[in-house]
Amino acid sequence: MNFCSHCGHTVRFVIPAGDDRPRYCCEECGTIHYQNPRIVAGTLPVSGSRVLLCRRAISPRKGFWTLPAGYMENAETTVDAAVRETWEEACAEVEIHGLYTLINLPHINQVYMIFRADLSGGFAAGPESLEVALFEEHEIPWDELAFPTIERTLRHFYDDRREDAFPLHVSDITPEDRERYFGSA
């Protein structure tokens, strides 16, 4: 950030009085520009024994498979965001069963919130998906998943399904986890 969105003057990256971390501050109008993590909300849509995945039509990770998910919008609940993203990416309606995975990615300022859901009708590729398809566990394209958050959610689901219990899973993805997943590129 170079300029204040309130008055247009140059900002400085400093620790404001009474704070404990650097922020972008405008010395002209006094505005402190707080930057907070982005929430990614989505679903794990299930139909019988199959899971719905979307092949991404956009960057990052274009062409790789993911669960329908995306950034939460202002004035939405997390459930509303998950349902909207599922509709936008997979043209699918779902019945939400509750928060399933909450995954922190502090190094990229994101929090993933994936809700377990039942698919309640048809599906088709939305504008952000090249294709959508239902997969049995043995058909999941593990080497073509877009993000470590998606792999972690799917692995929890298949482990939990064997036990027929679906607790909330809270975890972190570290920079080292991402490097192992994406390589050093």
Image (cartoon, helix red, strand yellow):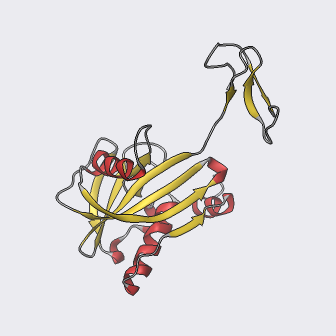
Extreme residue in the front direction: 18
Residue 94 drawn above or below residue 141 = above
Query: Would you place residue 31 above or below residue 135 in this image?
Result: above
Can the viewer see residue 148 in this picture?
Answer: no
Q: Position of residue 6 (x, y in %)?
A: 61, 17
For the point 50% across and 68% down, the residue is: 152
- Residue 28 falls in image quadrant: top right
- How far across and how far down the image is residue 5, in percent? 61, 19
Q: Nearer the viewer, residue 84 or 155?
A: 84
**What residue lies at 48% left-to-right and 50% top-to-bottom?**
40
Identity of the residue drawn at 47% across and 57% down: 113
Q: Nearer the viewer, residue 31 or 138?
A: 31
In the displayed orientation, state which residue is furthest to the bottom. 163
Q: Nearer the viewer, residue 98 or 113?
A: 98
Q: Quadrant of the N terminus?
A: top right
Q: Position of residue 141 (x, y in %)?
A: 39, 67
Numbered marks: total: 0
Q: Is residue 116 left or right of residue 105?
A: left
Where does the image place residue 86, in percent across and percent down from the top left? 32, 52
Above-or-below relation of 128 to 154: above
Please indicate, yes or no, whether residue 24 appears anywhere in the rendered image: yes
Corner quadrant of residue 167 = bottom left
Q: Residue furthest left?
A: 121
Quadrant of residue 137 within the rendered picture: bottom left
**Nearer to us in this view, 70 or 124:** 70
